[in-house]
Image (spheres, coloured by chain):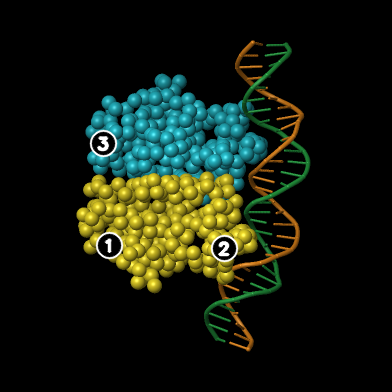
Chain colours: A yellow, B cyan, C orange, D green
Amino acid sequence: MVASHEHVIENRLLSKLPPEVRERLRPQLETVKFSLGQVIYESGGRMKHVYFPTTSHISLLYTMIDGSTAEMGLVGNEGVVGIALFMGGETTPNRAMVQGAGVAFRLKAKGMLDEFKRGGEFQHVMLRYTQALITQISQTAVCNRLHSVEQRLCRWLLMTRDRTGSDELQMTHEFISNMLGVRREGVTLAAKRLQELGMISYVRGHIIILDRQQLLERVCECYQVVKDEHKRLLG
Amino acid sequence: MVASHEHVIENRLLSKLPPEVRERLRPQLETVKFSLGQVIYESGGRMKHVYFPTTSHISLLYTMIDGSTAEMGLVGNEGVVGIALFMGGETTPNRAMVQGAGVAFRLKAKGMLDEFKRGGEFQHVMLRYTQALITQISQTAVCNRLHSVEQRLCRWLLMTRDRTGSDELQMTHEFISNMLGVRREGVTLAAKRLQELGMISYVRGHIIILDRQQLLERVCECYQVVKDEHKRLLG
DNA sequence: TTTTCTCTGTGCGTTAACACACATACGGTG
DNA sequence: CACCGTATGTGTGTTAACGCACAGAGAAAA
């Protein structure tokens, strides 16, 4: 069913580009399919493409020496993965992992850089997106420090929903715990509470958001701050 | 005593620029003095300049609705404050506050943008620094989630030391608690332990680092990751 | 159907950090 | 010097989250 809508599902950054730029990029864009859990960039690994998700979404994660992980950002069709390529770093010390299977466009580093260096709208959009991503990461830093597992779970569910565009999410408590940087049991407990309150319902790796409104009432301010800032920067 | 060294104390980003660019910027750079606690940018406020600290250093903070705060990044003479201006955002949803009194160069938004848009070395350096800052913020996000107050205090002391270049820091437990996003008592306890271990010594708003080596052994990996990444990006 | 694997539920003891409430100590000012 | 404001020390009780251990429940494979 994803395929049947492919002509309308776009990457929103690419959509913002003027026709002229899109024409230049179009022949260079390849379509790639991502499967759940696939690692797109490894920490410190050479990056060869930037990715513009359309139906997929990708987690930016950091893995500690002891193996514990935490998410710092989440990218869907509102963004791009691989900003280090135009920022000039070539690599980053974190991992990018597919969190929602689906499709993305990719663009070779060289082609992207050529366009970026023209200093036009492409550069402008990429930098504004990067600014929005910085806000997201910052807010995650603060949220991690000041808010409870339950609040962070609400935020994470809402963010994921925004990116899948669907109320049905395919993911286990274990998986979510790696994103939030907490124990699996902690997620189970928080999820159970949300279920009892009628906000979500779940079974074995399958979560349904029943009442988005209630989630919005329970989530911490961080969710809205990030969303507003993205809107401000990218309309 | 600071004054007597002023000719050697530079901002390290400005130092990296080729002579030609420095010549263009020189007439536009003004020197400003910052006092402890001074707010340079308010959350969402209009930014008119970017600042290149030399002897001062600045905290990037987020303040929650309930007033609790946490730091997401720290900028000294290795960086620049006000990246939103060239990223295209004009404002950010966080505050920049002086954490170490001292001097900085400032550059008007317009002049900075003119240079940035040339697409040369200035842009290159600014973007690479932004990439390093993103690493710092990301690592803060993860560190906030996974490490203890004591470890985070070690990290913070080391980061601050790197930026002041001095083993003597002027700051109260209360102040530090607002940076780490913890209670004042939590800082007192952690600081006491570090003092008992002979790593630091303190009285009333005055901390001395006695044994940097020991701090390095006790700090979490986050400190080094950020430092290495900055070095990789900006040599 | 039975087996096996994965996911979720739950209990229990432990710990880090919290909130609040004061006590004490330093150091600048009158 | 005495005073007072600010900084630090400390106790008590509470809570969120942890680590571990294992039980139960689906789902998929045999």
Q: Is residue A164 visible?
A: yes
Amino acid at the residue labelled 2:
Ile
Q: Nearer the viewer, residue C5 or B3?
A: C5
Residue sitting at x 49%, y 42%: B72
Residue at mark 1: chain: A
Q: Residue B120's image quarter?
A: top left
The percent position of residue B22, horizontal first and vertical second, equals 27, 32
Q: Nearer the viewer, residue B168 or A112?
A: A112
Q: Nearer the viewer, residue B89 or B27?
A: B89
Q: Do the residues labelled 1 and 3 touch (CB within 8 Å)?
A: no
Residue at mark 2: chain: A
- According to the picture, the residue beneath numbered tag 3 turns out to be B114
The percent position of residue A109, horizontal first and vertical second, equals 29, 56
Mark 1 vs mark 2: which is more N-terminal? 1
A207 on left or right of B29:
right
The percent position of residue C30, horizontal first and vertical second, equals 64, 10
Residue at mark 3: chain: B
A192 on left or right of A43:
right
Packing grade of label 2 (10 A; few <14, some 14-19, many >=20) is: many
- According to the picture, the residue beneath numbered tag 2 turns out to be A200
Q: How far apart are marks 1 and 3 (CA)?
A: 31 Å
Residue sitting at x 32%, y 33%: B109
**Are discs 1 and 3 located on one and the same chain?**
no
SS for callout 2: strand
- According to the picture, the residue beneath numbered tag 1 turns out to be A29
